């Protein structure tokens, strides 16, 4: 009887752990497994939607359907041999090793925030028309909805971003805005040569301020929580 009870408890625990993995998760960081071998980085911002069984990228509208085996913690795609094993890591993330990448990718869950009622095209117009105050009194950003002349072809639709740090020469970069499950995300790339995109979840849009949650951040815009419009 005790042995049977133990088996039931273990099965229930396994079921609860699997059920906890739900919602939208994004690739935030990677760890190289063996530095003596070659490795191929995955794109930060890769998304896995465990509710809809889809893989996409935070910068793109297109999605790929996948199969998720919660019992064995396996992600697969119909017609393909390769499988992805996922596992819990600490209390707030999951880890996945991609075939032949020689890396372990760490995914974090995106908090569900659906406060914005504006449609995507109106949000793009908002950024295009607004003048924003320099970030930390030093970095000026000007969003333009016109198509970028130097897009990152591996990502989605890129728009023109002009930036200027203090009195330095103006730079032309890229930005994008996407919608995922009625939530909005903005990617900002100041330097198109290094192709580093800071990615933020848009928490709210008010008349004179845009509240942001940093998902993927590089040194040029650390801990950015809001964009204030010129009065």
Image (cartoon, rainbow, N blue to C red):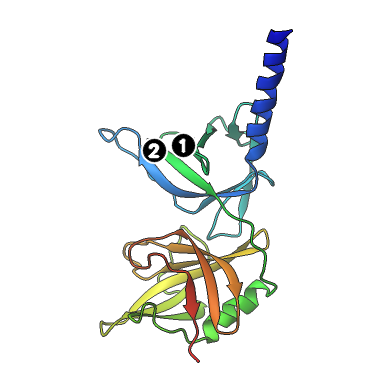
Residue sitting farthest toward the front = 2
* Quadrant of the image occupied by residue 123: bottom right
Find numbered disc 2 in the image and state the secondary structure of the residue it sits on. Answer: strand
Determine whether label 1 and label 2 are within 8 Å by CB. yes
Whether residue 69 is visible, yes or no, is no
Mark sitting earlier along the chain (1/2): 1
Question: Residue drawn 63% across and 76% down?
Answer: 121
Query: Dot 2 surroundings within 10 Å: few (below 14), some, or many (20 or more)?
Result: many
In x, y percent, where is residue 29?
Answer: 42, 48
Helix, strand or loop at label 1? It is: loop
| Quarter of the rendering occupied by the N terminus | top right
Work out whether 119 lies above or below 11. below
In front of the other: 138 or 54: 138
Residue 98: horizontal and vertical position, in percent? 46, 37
89 lies above or below 165: above
Q: Is residue 218 left or right of residue 129?
A: left
Q: Position of residue 166 (x, y in %)?
A: 28, 83
- On the image, numbered disc 1 is attached to which residue? 98
Please count the marks in the image.
2
Does any portion of residue 43 appear in the rendered image? Answer: yes
Q: Which mark is residue 103?
A: 2
| Distance (Cα) linking label 1 and label 2 | 7 Å
Q: Residue at x 39, y 82 (%)?
A: 134
* Dot label at residue 159: none
Residue drawn where x is 57% and y is 51% of the image: 56
Within 10 Å of the Cα at label 1, are there few (<14), some (14-19), or many (20+) other Cα atoms? some
């Amino acid at each position: 009887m005790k042995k049977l009870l133990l088996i039931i408890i273990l099965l229930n625990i396994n079921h609860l752990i699997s059920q906890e993995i739900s919602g939208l998760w994004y690739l935030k960081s990677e760890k190289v497994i063996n530095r003596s071998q070659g490795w191929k980085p995955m794109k930060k911002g890769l998304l896995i939607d465990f509710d809809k069984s889809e893989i996409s990228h935070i910068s793109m509208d297109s999605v790929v359907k996948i199969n998720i085996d919660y019992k064995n913690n396996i992600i697969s795609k119909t017609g393909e041999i390769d499988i992805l094993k996922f596992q819990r890591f600490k209390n707030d993330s999951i880890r996945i090793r991609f075939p032949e990448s020689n890396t372990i990718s760490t995914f974090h869950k995106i908090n569900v925030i659906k406060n914005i009622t504006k449609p995507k095209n109106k949000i793009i117009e908002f950024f295009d028309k607004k003048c924003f105050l320099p970030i930390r009194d030093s970095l000026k950003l000007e969003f333009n909805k016109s198509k970028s002349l130097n897009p990152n072809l591996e990502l989605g639709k890129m728009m023109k971003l002009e930036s200027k740090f203090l009195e330095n020469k103006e730079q032309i970069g890229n930005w994008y805005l996407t919608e995922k499950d009625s939530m909005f995300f903005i990617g900002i790339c100041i330097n198109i040569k290094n192709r580093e995109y800071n990615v933020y979840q848009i928490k709210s849009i008010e008349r004179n301020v845009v509240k942001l949650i940093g998902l993927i951040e590089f040194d040029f815009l650390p801990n950015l929580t809001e964009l204030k419009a010129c009065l």
